[in-house]
Image: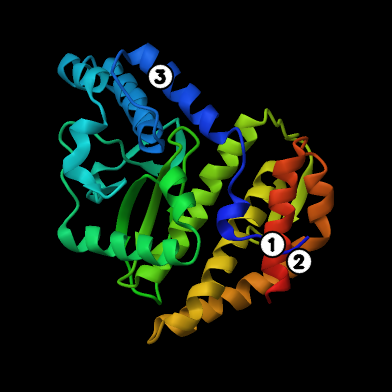
Amino acid sequence: MSALSPEALVALGGITDHQRLRTSRITSVLGNRLGSSALDYAVAHHLLEGAEHAARARDSDRLDWYRNATVRDLTHLSAGPHIVLNPRPGDLLRSEISETAYYLVGPDTSPAPPEARDLVRAALASATEHGFGTLLTQHAPVICLLNRRRLDETLHSWAINRLPGTVFTDYTEHPEVLARDMIHESAHNWLNDALAAHNVSLPADITFFSPWRGAPRPVYGFLHACWAFSLTVLYVRRTRHSVTGPVVPFLDAHLRQQEDQFASAIDSLAEALSYVSADALRDRVSHAVSMAVDSA
């Protein structure tokens, strides 16, 4: 099979219908008037979780906001088709819905500062230039910037199953690094939507060694790592030749590290993919990994 473009890799039928169905179900529960876009889908989950938090806290005013808010009420937070959040560390939440901290948009959410929005726009432009625009529009319409870091500091990023379409990530001053991490987390959101859209159920009791974690991982976690890191490799290889300065050795180090990780994981991929019952989805993950490995 010839190499697919990044756009073609993520063009999988059923995902849009799944997002619209989920949004309509949340709308029927909350009663607000949401649309059918990917941004509506992401915001719907923020509103649902926020409404639950408000109900448990017996905060009727906040509950009313979550039950009536729509995307139109959040335009002050937007940067193009995306919402950009930049909460203070003290505003992050911790609860049983996630092992990691997260943030919910609310009536008191302030716009991200101009420099943060400009950085996101530059990162989105870089991702779009190299074929990942659709992935980020459809699976990262809500971008939550966390801590500003230097290139020599550890960067953390994550996505949460209960908040599909939202990515949480640290960032540097370099848009290419932010684009890389947004692509990684939106890839996780894509795969979750794809598994749900195609009714794929993966066994929890079968594991494969994950070099990214240095430990055995269930099929779900192993495939998530293979897919997400494949897309970051494809992006970094495309953008690597158009950047200059200190970000160049940073990106080169990422590619060398991923080459080693995939060398340790590739022999298990076919067996792990055998548990994916949807042919089109299985082929996408297999092809992405092959492209990442072959481009080394």
Q: Which badge, 1 or 2, is on the more N-terminal residue? A: 1
Real-space Cα distance between discs 1 and 2? 6 Å
Pointer 1 and pointer 2: residues touching (CB < 8 Å)?
yes
Residue 5: x %, y % from top left? 60, 61
* SS at circle 2: helix
Q: Quadrant of the C terminus?
A: bottom right
Task: Give the residue displayed 34% in from the left and 74% down from the top.
Answer: 150
Q: Nearer the viewer, residue 47 or 158?
A: 47
Q: Nearer the viewer, residue 128 or 290?
A: 128
Q: Residue 211 — which label?
A: 1
Examine the image and state in which quarter residue 149 appears: bottom left
Q: Which residue is label 2 attached to?
A: 264
Q: On the rendered structure, is 9 left or right of 38?
A: right
Q: Which badge, 1 or 3, is on the more N-terminal residue? A: 3
Examine the image and state in which quarter residue 204 appears: top right
In the rendered image of this protein, does residue 123 appear above or below residue 166?
Answer: below
Pointer 2 and pointer 3: residues touching (CB < 8 Å)?
no
Residue 21: x %, y % from top left? 49, 22
* SS at circle 3: helix
Task: Give the residue displayed 41% in from the left and 81% down from the top.
Answer: 243
Real-space Cα distance between discs 1 and 3? 38 Å
Residue type at mark 1? Answer: Pro
Q: Which badge, 2 or 3, is on the more N-terminal residue? A: 3
Q: On the rendered structure, is 1 left or right of 244?
A: right
Q: Nearer the viewer, residue 13 or 237?
A: 13
Residue 185: x %, y % from top left? 49, 51
Q: Which residue is label 3 attached to?
A: 26
Judge the density around disc 1: few (<14), some (14-19), many (≥20) Cα neighbours within 10 Å: some
Closer to the camera: disc 1 or disc 3? 3
Task: Give the residue displayed 70% in from the left and 64% down from the top.
Answer: 3
Real-space Cα distance between discs 2 and 3? 41 Å
Residue type at mark 2? Answer: Ser
